[in-house]
Structure formats: structure tokens, C-alpha cells
Amino acid sequence: MSSTKFEVEYVAELARIKLTQEEISTFRSQLGLVLQHVERLNEVDVSNVEPMAHSFPTYNVFRGDEPREGLDRESALANAPRRAQGLFMVTKVVE
Amino acid sequence: MEITSLTAHEILNLLRSRQISPKEVVTALSQRLEKVDPLVHAYLSHDLERALADADSADVSLPLGGLPISIKDVISVKGHPCGCASKILEGYIAPYDATVVSRLRAAGAIPFGRLNMDEFAMGSSTENSAFGPSKNPWDTTCTPGGSSGGSAAAVAADEAFAALGSDTGGSIRQPAALCGCVGLKPTYGRVSRYGLVAFASSLDQIGPLTKDVEDAALLMDCIAGLDKNDSTSLPEPVPNFSANLRKGVKGFKIGLPKEYFIEGLDPGVEKAVRTAVEHLQALGAELFEISLPHTEHALSAYYIIAPAEASANLARFDGVRYGFRASETKGLIDHYGRTREEGFGAEVKRRVILGTYVLSSGYYDAYYLRAQKVRTLIRRDFAEAFKKVDVIACPTSPTPAFRLGERTNDPLSMYLADIFTLAANMAGICGISIPCGFADQGGKQLPVGLQILGKELDESTVLQTSYAYEQSTDWHKAKPMIGNGVSRARKNHAL
């Protein structure tokens, strides 16, 4: 792995964040330094070590399949930036 | 004496004996805020009318009856704003109560105000707030730390009797240390995260920031325990933290990790912390040098895992269901890109991009998977250490409060502010920061925090150790001079 391959523009596109030219160059140098730092993990011997996603063993937590009160439609829509006819309005996806 | 300079348990005594009414308490707090907050900027907003209405119906016979508790802007309070100090959530009103908030309400508390923070809890100084930084009440040219900087500053400046914060890599403990108050990060899963806006879901935990250890125990008694709305909350019995406080530290084994007393540690901080552990020894504890060999790698692993989880969690901010939406966008991709460009601040963008990168095809194994393995090693370090000792004592932060603007252009130096706190989140264990003295910073005396780490689910021992230390010192009574008239002189503690 090498931070020199770190292409800010491409990764920002994956993350769905537009950046200005200035941000691209600032982030490139700042995150380059951060990546250089975190790449010190290469020094650690991790052979035969299990990865840990969670601090405690996790397991599925089940509940009975019974209906519960949720948010009513009005509360769910109350924060929507655009709404129409009791629905969220989205940007056109298909032509 | 001003009402607002009292601790939560002192106020509750006055409320219970009807020497003061909840309305008077809310009013006094609001007046204090008006006087001091223009200097500190701990709050993003507060709704006095609503708090007075809650005060009207408060039942003072309940454990927290009539006590206003201030809430970090990342925790949902029904009908209140919950904006994470971000432009992307400006105007968002929470449609439900977080479990911690419904538990506080059930205990009689009054949710009061929205506390400033680093945007989405990403930062160590509150300078990443979209609404301007909070200031350290001990020196308003310095940061209060972060990300729960508003919470810590409010408690330290007597603008809050107690507050809730969240801690993903030190965001409760580090600002508590820098502002001279108490901040507890419970064990992962001890307190429900339901209603907490997610930053890094395997690391986030809600906890109290308070004026003393007794108040921290009091709040924990009300908020801890299993919640069916958070499948990661632990089905373990919750002890009565308050009842166990006064048992002392006689015979306790305290570990001092040699990797935490290193070059770069501020000499004033080191002196205060070493004096504090000697004090604990004088109270009957035994000291042992221990080793946490993977300490130096915790920061690297953290800054892979936390941004990775953040990049996934923050994908929900798409400008459709809530929050800011860019106008006049050209198609869906442009809609996402510009909404997030205009809605997120620089640090959030940096971390989402970093997180996206370490999870991206071809890099996942090299960064994320390796970091998860190192996380296992960090957890093992602590498990080994806790076979030998009951708690671990070390500095909370390598330095006292740093100046506003000092680190904003250098993300890596800002990340280093969490170097002593984030391992506890990686391992899932609990930890507290309590005031243990002062260190000289540019001619000013600024607070130092002693961090006490405990094994998983052992908040009781951590609180008990903290209480024994606190009650035999006066550090927790020291007050900043801000807002005139309520400063209590700082005294040196004596054995």
C-alpha cells in the first residue's frame, strides 16, 4: 500500500462529495501526511491475529415479530427539504 | 453563593427540601448563560420557555427531579434541534427522544439547551463547529478541547449543572481534562446509543460531564443499562454506582503504563499526574508499572477505523429525508455531490474521504483489515494489564488546553490530542478524566486531567477510585474567573 497512489478527486467522487481545486490540493497534502502516519501499522506483526470489528462478541438480538408504533407520516416528513403529497421528493433518477 | 455554582447533587438537595423551586433553578441557569455564554459560546441554542414549562411540571421527589441537564447537539431530544453543529442538519428538529433523554426525563430531569461540539463529533477542539468554536473558560484564547467542548466548557463555567456528551476517541474525557471537570466514558454498550447521531458505531458511547464524581455516578445510575432499541447495549446488571462511591482505594492495584509517560508529554501535566498517583498511593492503593505495548499504534488504527465507519454512517446525509439540500442541481450525482460539498465542513469531508479510501477496492485489506487486527492486539494489551491491576492511571491529554487556531491547519497534530484516550474506545473499556491540578501554559495556569481506565463494565471501581482521590483534594472545587463573582480560590491540596 502506498499513499502516493491516493487520488483525492477519485475518492471524493466515490464519497459523493464535490471539492474545489483548493480543497483537492489541501486534502491531498494533509491526508497524505495522515496516511504516511497510519502506514506505520505495517510494522506490526498481525500474523495469526483475528480482526476485531467490535469490542464485544456480537450476536443477533431478536424480538417477537409484532407491530410497534413508529413515527407517523407527518413527523417522518417534517424535516424533509422537499416533500409533496405526503412523500419525500427526490431528484429525478431516470430519464 | 450563586445557585449556578452548585453541583447537581447540591441543587437536588435544595430542590428536594423545597428551599428552591425548579423554576428558580432554570431561571438562574438561563441568567448565568446570558452573562457568560457570549464569552464561552458553549451553547448553540436554548429554549427557556420550554425549560420553564418542564420545570412547572417537575416532580422533585424523583432522583433528578427538577434538575436541568444540558445536552450535546448530537443527542436527540424530541422537539429540540439536533444539528451536530453542522450546516447539513441546520434546522433539523428531532422527532423522538434518545433513550438517555427519555431515562433522564423519567428521573425528573429537564433537558436544557443544545451544546456546541465539533461537527459530527469529529475534532478535539470544537473549532470544527459550523457555528464557531467554544472557548475555554480558564483562558478564552484557548480551546476547551473536543468534541464535547461545549459540554465541558458549560460545566466548567457554571453554565450547566451537568451535561451529556459522547466519546468516540476521547471526546468526553479530553475536553473534561482541558476544562477541569469530570468526564466519564462508560464501557461500550453500557449506555444506549439510540438517538445518538452515529459517528463511528463500534466506538461511540454516551456519558456524563459533571462538576464532581458524585454527579457522574448519579447520572450513570439513571442512564445505564440494556435498551431494546440498541442491540449493542449490554444485557448486564447495572450496579448502583452512587452506593459504591465511598468504599475507598485501600488495597487497590493501580497500573501506570510506561508508554503513557513519554517524550512530548507536557512537564506540568506529567508532574500533576505523577503527584496524583502518589496521592492515591498515600490513600492506600498500590502502584505498579505496566506495559501496553501496542499503544503507539492505537492512533493509526483509530484513524483508519473511525473514518471508515464515519464514511458509511454519513452516507445518510443525502439531502432527501432531512437536512440541507443544495439548490438547482443537475441530476442525482450532482445533487449528492453539491449537497455534501455545501453541507459538510472541512474536517468531515477529510474524514469521509479518508474513510472511503481505506474501505475502497484494493485498499481494504491493507488498511482497514490490518487496523482491525491491531485493534485486537490493543484489546489484548488491556486484558493482560487488567489481570494484574484493578485500574490504570495516566494523563488524559498530553498537554493542557492549546490555543484557538494553533492546530487547525495541521490535522495530524490535532489528531495527536487524543493519543491517550482513544485506546479505551478501541478496546471498549471504560475511563474517566478528573481534575488533578494545573499546568503552566504561557504564564497561565490551566487544568490537568487524570485519566483512570477500568476494565469492561467496571465503572464502579473507576468511580470509586476517582471519588477517593477527589474527596481528599480540592481540585474539583477550583473555578475559572469567568463571569465574575463566583470564583472560588484554587487551593493546593494537602494530604
Image (tube, coloured by chain):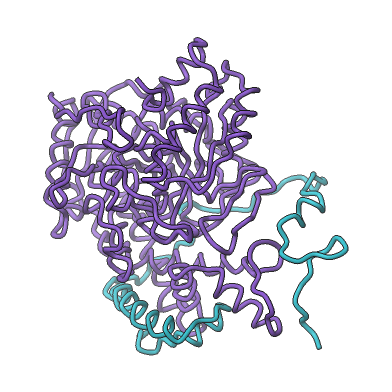
Q: Nearer the viewer, residue B229 or B330?
A: B330
Q: Nearer the viewer, residue B237 or B350?
A: B350
Q: Residue at x 64, y 28 (%)?
A: B53
Q: Residue at x 57, y 15 (%)?
A: B61
Q: Looking at the figure, which quarter contains the N terminus of chain B?
A: top left
Q: Nearer the viewer, residue B251 or B38?
A: B38
| Apparent side of residue A2 relative to residue B121 in the rendered image (left or right) | left
Image quadrant where residue B101 sits: top right
Chain B, colour shown: purple
Q: Say above or below: B358 vs B125.
A: below
Q: Say above or below: B12 vs B453.
A: above
**Total marks in image:** 0
Q: Residue at x 30, y 78 (%)?
A: A33
Image quadrant where residue B366 sits: bottom left
Q: Residue at x 82, y 46 (%)?
A: A67
| Apparent side of residue A91 relative to residue B202 in the rendered image (left or right) | right
> Where residue B323 sits: x, y (%)?
64, 62
Q: Looking at the figure, which quarter contains the C terminus of chain B?
A: top left
Letter of the chain in cyan: A
| Apparent side of residue A80 relative to residue B478 in the rendered image (left or right) | right
> Where residue B416 sits: x, y (%)?
28, 62
> Where residue B191 sits: x, y (%)?
52, 41
Q: Say above or below: B133 vs B268.
A: below
Q: Nearer the viewer, residue B187 or B104?
A: B104
> Where residue B289 sits: x, y (%)?
16, 45
